[in-house]
Image (cartoon, helix red, strand yellow):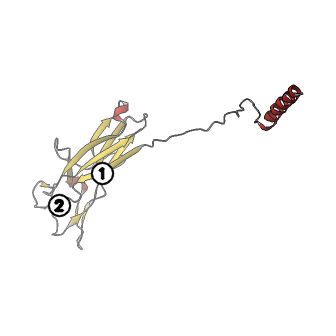
Amino acid sequence: MRSAKAVCSGTLCSLLAVVFSAPAFAQLTSAPVPVALVALAPESLTVTLTSGATVNFTLTGGSADLGSITPAWTTTWNLKPSRNSVAVCVFLSGALTGTGTNTDTVPMANILGQPDAAGSFTAITGNGCGQTGNALLINTYALTSPASRKNVSKNDSVALEINDSALTLEADTYSGTLNIVAQATP
């Protein structure tokens, strides 16, 4: 009887172990759901003035009156592979006008620039960087490799002078604006 009790007891224990233990099933995995990942590195093109926020001239009636300081700036870019060049220009917003009641002006043709302190002074009356008739091209940078398009910084400057030899200006303060711009093409 003891052996029947032992068998019964063992069977009961086995049954109870099956009932109270976690079922042993194989793992079940769902189908994967894709999530698109898009990382955008936007193009950028900036110009930062490093010196020369105000350029003063003393107009003497001579042939060339140099500006008191040479404006300098840094052009920085990170561009797409389709870009092939960066042009850097300065342009005038208009003639220099008197701040008093007179109507005299310093015409744009009399305002000259010398790019990066090289070569001769040229009237700021050309075309460039989307400007027509009031610009001077300072530099053009060819973008021939990935390294020439990614996180690049270039320094430029323009010395300025006013040719007032043929002007008869009333004593006054004449003011205007020189703008610096960069343009990536195409």
Picture coordinates of residue 173, whole percent (x, y):
19, 68
Q: Is tag 2's residue or tag 1's residue first in the polypeptide sequence?
A: 1
Mark 2, secondary structure of its residue: loop
Instruction: Kindly identify the residue that appears in the image at 16 percent across and 65 percent down.
Output: 169
Disc 1 designates what residue? 48
Q: Check if mark 2's residue and mark 1's residue have beta carbons within 8 Å.
A: no
Residue 95 circle label: none
Q: Give the answer, above or below, for where 137 lies relative to 145.
A: below
In this rendering, position of residue 120 left or right of residue 179: left
Q: Please, what is the three-letter code of the amino acid marked with disc 1?
A: Thr
Along the line of sight, which residue is nearer the eye, 62 or 67? 67
Q: Give the answer, above or below, for where 108 lies relative to 36.
A: below
Q: Quadrant of residue 137?
A: top left
Picture coordinates of residue 143, whole percent (x, y):
35, 33
In this rendering, position of residue 129 left or right of residue 123: right
In this rendering, position of residue 137 left or right of residue 17: left
Q: Quadrant of residue 81?
A: top left
C-alpha separation, residue under disc 2 versus residue under disc 1 = 20 Å
Crowd tier of the residue under label 1, counting other residues whose Cα lies within 10 Å: few below 14, some 14–19, many 20 or above: few
Q: Residue furthest front?
A: 2
Q: Residue furthest bottom?
A: 101
Which of discs 2 and 1 lies nearer the camera? The answer is: 1
Q: Please, what is the three-letter code of the amino acid marked with disc 2?
A: Asn
Disc 2 designates what residue? 56
